[in-house]
Image (cartoon, rainbow, N blue to C red):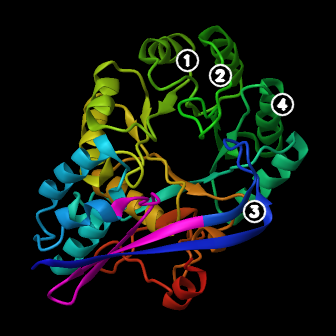
């Protein structure tokens, strides 16, 4: 089998009302997604999505005419490209989709087949006042979620504590709560200083009293000593690693025992194969592996297959913040949005590969 073409459909969905992401200084009035198609001489096509794939065309010749099933070689090639250019991990996801189709099994089976379903947590994306967030949390609980993550702005910590308090008062112990400070990486142009360790320690101590499951991205990702101090002294689990650029950097985080929860997104950070290794290393240290998944439904499925394969958890992130962010918006180019079942679980599709079904009409409509 040979790769005959790599096709990129670059789509843009207008957002009205806009999505005001907590980590982005600019309100989002459109949502961009790139669908990667890997065609073969045997008529099979693999699909992936996640990163924008900007500038990939310059490197396409490194894959054309090659056997798509030699995935480790392609991963190594993608790592060399990542040093010089972009993160093109959706291509690896498309290759695993192909391999699953060839073998006739879901990718999760190829990654170990530990489980076929995982409980999802509702990952809120906007900053909203405490009373509104309490209502949002109740609505999410009624939809089936038993865990919720809220964003907190680094310059509005008191409001963040009030949000967590309001959710805890509304739902009691019926829901697990996570908090994301979004301090590990920045959007382009965001050069405001991060909170220092002393401030974060005080915040973490207050969260401990509210029985928060984990505190995510509390410090810049290179501050491994600070992360370790925080997790060892404040009694709150520390999560991070979602956008770490290289595999050695993630391994260094594991070796430094900097985190309780490792979160590399398989279509944004280090790819599926390397993320699986990180998951195994974390598991050996009795740490958690539950990746970031804030891209689209196809990216969410790629992460689901890796976590289900290795038996990660205890939850998997499910981007969800109606009305601004819904499964229908997130998965606009899929035939059906990825959804939780009535028990709040994400189920691995039983179709071979990643299991996505592309809505070709939607792709044509929204391609720029």
The answer to which of marks 4 and 1 sits earlier in the sequence is 4
Separation (CA) of disc 4 from disc 3: 20 Å
Which label lies toward us, 2 or 4?
4
Establish if 84 lies above or below 349: above
The reply to whether residue 166 is visible in this rendering is yes
Circle 1 — which element? loop
State if disc 1 and disc 2 touch (CB < 8 Å): yes
Q: Is residue 42 magenta?
A: yes
Label 2 near label 3: C-beta < 8 Å? no
Label disc, if present, on residue 208 of the rendered structure: 2
Mark 3 highlights which residue? 322
Residue bearing mark 1: 235
**Which numbered disc flags the more N-terminal residue, 1 or 3?**
1
Question: Does residue 54 show up magenta in the picture?
Answer: yes
Over which residues does the magenta segment extend?
32-56
Mark earlier in primary sequence (2, 4): 4
Q: How far apart in space, not on screen, are marks 3 and 2 (Cα)?
A: 28 Å
State the separation of the CA atoms marked 2 and 4: 16 Å
Could you classify mark 1 by the number of other residues whose Cα lies within 10 Å: few (under 14), some (14-19), or many (20 or more)?
A: some
From the image, state whether disc 3 or disc 2 is nearer to you.
3
Above/below status of 196 relative to 52: above
Q: Residues within 10 Å of mark 4 (few under 14, many from 20)?
A: some
**Badge 3 local density, few (<14 within 10 Å), some, or many (20+)?**
some
Kindly indicate the quadrant of the structure image that contains residue 9.
Answer: bottom left
Alpha-carbon distance for marks 2 and 1? 7 Å
Q: Which residue is mark 4?
A: 159
In the image, 262 versus 315, the foreground residue is 262
* Circle 1/circle 3 CB separation < 8 Å: no
Q: In what quadrant of the picture does the N terminus appear?
A: bottom left
1 vs 3, front mark? 3
x, y percentage for residue 74? 18, 58
270 or 143, which lies in front? 270
């Amino acid at each position: 089998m040979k790769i005959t073409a790599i096709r990129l459909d670059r789509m843009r969905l207008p957002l009205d009302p806009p999505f005001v992401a907590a980590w982005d200084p600019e309100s989002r009035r459109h949502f961009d997604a790139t669908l990667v198609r890997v065609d073969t001489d045997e008529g099979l096509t693999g699909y992936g999505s996640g990163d924008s794939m900007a500038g990939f065309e310059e490197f396409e010749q490194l894959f054309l005419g090659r056997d798509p099933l030699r995935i480790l070689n392609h991963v190594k090639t993608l790592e060399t490209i990542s040093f010089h250019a972009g993160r093109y991990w959706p291509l690896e996801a498309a290759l695993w989709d192909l391999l699953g189709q060839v073998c006739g099994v879901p990718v999760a089976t190829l990654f170990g087949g530990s489980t076929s379903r995982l409980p999802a947590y509702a990952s809120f994306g906007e900053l909203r006042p405490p009373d509104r967030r309490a209502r949002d949390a109740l609505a999410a609980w009624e939809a089936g979620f038993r865990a919720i993550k809220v964003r907190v702005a680094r310059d509005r910590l008191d409001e963040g504590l009030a949000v967590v308090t309001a959710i805890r008062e509304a739902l009691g112990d019926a829901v697990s709560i996570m908090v994301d400070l979004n301090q590990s990486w920045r959007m382009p142009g965001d050069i405001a200083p991060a909170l220092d360790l002393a401030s974060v320690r005080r915040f973490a101590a207050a969260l401990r009293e509210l029985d928060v499951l984990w505190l995510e991205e509390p410090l810049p990702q290179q501050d491994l000593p600070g992360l370790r101090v925080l997790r060892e002294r404040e009694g709150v689990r520390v999560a991070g690693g979602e956008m770490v650029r290289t595999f050695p950097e993630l391994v260094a985080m594991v070796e430094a025992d900097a985190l309780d929860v490792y979160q590399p997104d398989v279509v944004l950070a280090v790819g599926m194969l390397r993320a699986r290794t990180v998951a195994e290393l974390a598991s050996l240290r009795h740490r958690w592996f539950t990746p970031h998944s804030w891209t689209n439904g196809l990216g969410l499925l790629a992460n689901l297959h890796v976590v289900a394969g290795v038996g990660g958890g205890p939850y998997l992130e499910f981007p969800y913040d109606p009305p601004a962010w819904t499964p229908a918006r997130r998965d606009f180019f899929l035939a059906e949005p990825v959804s939780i079942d009535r028990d709040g679980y994400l189920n691995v599709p039983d179709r071979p590969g990643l299991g996505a079904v592309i809505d070709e009409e939607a792709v044509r409509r929204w391609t720029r």
